[in-house]
Amino acid sequence: MPRFSIVIPSRNRADLALSALQSVLEQDFRDFEVIVSDNSDEDESKALFRALQPFSADPRFRYIKPQRPLPMTAHWEWAVAHATGEYVGILTDRMILRLYTLSTVDAVIARGGPELVAYERTNLIETGTSFAVPKKGSGAAPLVTIRKTAPIIEAFSRSDFSPMDTPRFLNSFVSATFLDHLRSEYGSVFTGVAPDYGFLMRVLDQIDEFPFIETPLLIKHSEDRSNGKSFTHYNLDKAGNDFIAFSRSEQGEFLKFSPVPDDLVMITNVMMREYEIGRHNQRRGHFPNFEKQAFYNESLRHLMVLKREGKNVALLLDRMEKYRAENGLSSYRLSSRERRKHIRAKIRRILGFSPRKRKPKLEGQTFPTIIDALRIEAQERRNRLVLSNEELVSFG
């Protein structure tokens, strides 16, 4: 039994899966297994299988493939069932781990054997042709805090989705015993349409607190190929539409939990659907009914941002007005600050300018590949550790 199992579920993104795999195989902690679970269509699957051949001789690496492509939730359930480690984590194909992630998590586990350890996440800096790892969190000694789950539940019930660094299996390692407990309690580890949030709701139902590493050990990239991002910004691509098709055909029983059942793309509706599934399946009665007025207000705020970006959200606005009328809610009023933003955005559209976007702050050099950026960042951290130890000895 290895200390860790890292499961990498991939669908039709062979190029991205390689970076995720490399970030695991080059960890400074060696006691692990890594499993790539290929949920791709036939042609894409062949491409991924060929790309993985250089790693096939590594005894820590395994390749698995379901008999047919599965919905995301079913695929995660199937893939995680193959893990044999004491602690299990998921790394999607467009995410990477800092090369000292496993050693950092192992040090926290060694303090008391918690059921779950979570950690912060951040975004890779991408310039189009090169990459850099953000400087935040590259210090020697990460801060570990204890987070309560009750405030997270309360925030979700008010449609406040700002506590994003929640334990969603993507940014956490979970004990095999706790996974077995979830299976015995609910029949499965994951549920709903979005398995990361389905898992989160089960964690919130079962755990009162968990250790959290205040260091972004998980790094996301290729945001333009993220289903969640495409839903948030209403830019549905082939992968997003593929996700919706699976949801309609094979997970339709979950759609009735949405506040607006006929909508599958508005991100606030998607998030609240997963909360409602969790509330319906809860065992300890900690999940309150969600606040309909807060949900309506947050949905309108989100739609106004999309409208400011030039998106055609008329259908979504109509659905929300119907929802408001059916539930006797108050109309949403833009703040003066929001009105000013809309006016400025409208002027920019009239003048033919694109919406303003914040550029990530780049510190230091960039590198031609993602794994190069990770290696250099890890080496710089090791150098700082050596220097700190030398200074300590000198002082002594």
Image (tube, rainbow, N blue to C red):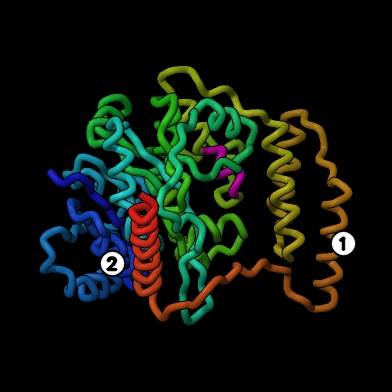
| Residue carrying label 2 | 22
Whether residue 272 is in magenta: the answer is yes
Q: Looking at this view, is 382 or 287 the one in front?
A: 382
| Residue carrying label 1 | 343
**The N terminus sits in image quarter:** top left
Q: What secondary structure is found at the residue carrying circle 1?
A: helix
Q: What secondary structure is found at the residue carrying circle 2?
A: helix
Residue at image location 72% in from the left, 29% down from the top:
327
Q: Looking at this view, is 375 or 241 the one in front?
A: 375
Residue 151 percent coordinates (x, y): 56, 28
Residue at image location 47% in from the left, 79% down from the top:
130
Q: Amino acid at mark 2?
A: Gln
Residue 90 percent coordinates (x, y): 33, 50
Residue 197 percent coordinates (x, y): 45, 41
- What's the magenta bit mostly, secondary-structure-wise? helix
- Which numbered disc, 1 or 2, marks the residue that appears first in the sequence? 2
Q: Which residues are magenta?
A: 267-273
Q: Amino acid at mark 1?
A: Ile
Whether residue 316 is in magenta: the answer is no
Q: Residues within 10 Å of mark 1 (few under 14, many from 20)?
A: few
Does residue 165 appear in the picture of this structure? yes
Answer with left or right where residue 359 lies relative to residue 98. right
Above or below 269: residue 352: below
Residue 282 percent coordinates (x, y): 43, 23
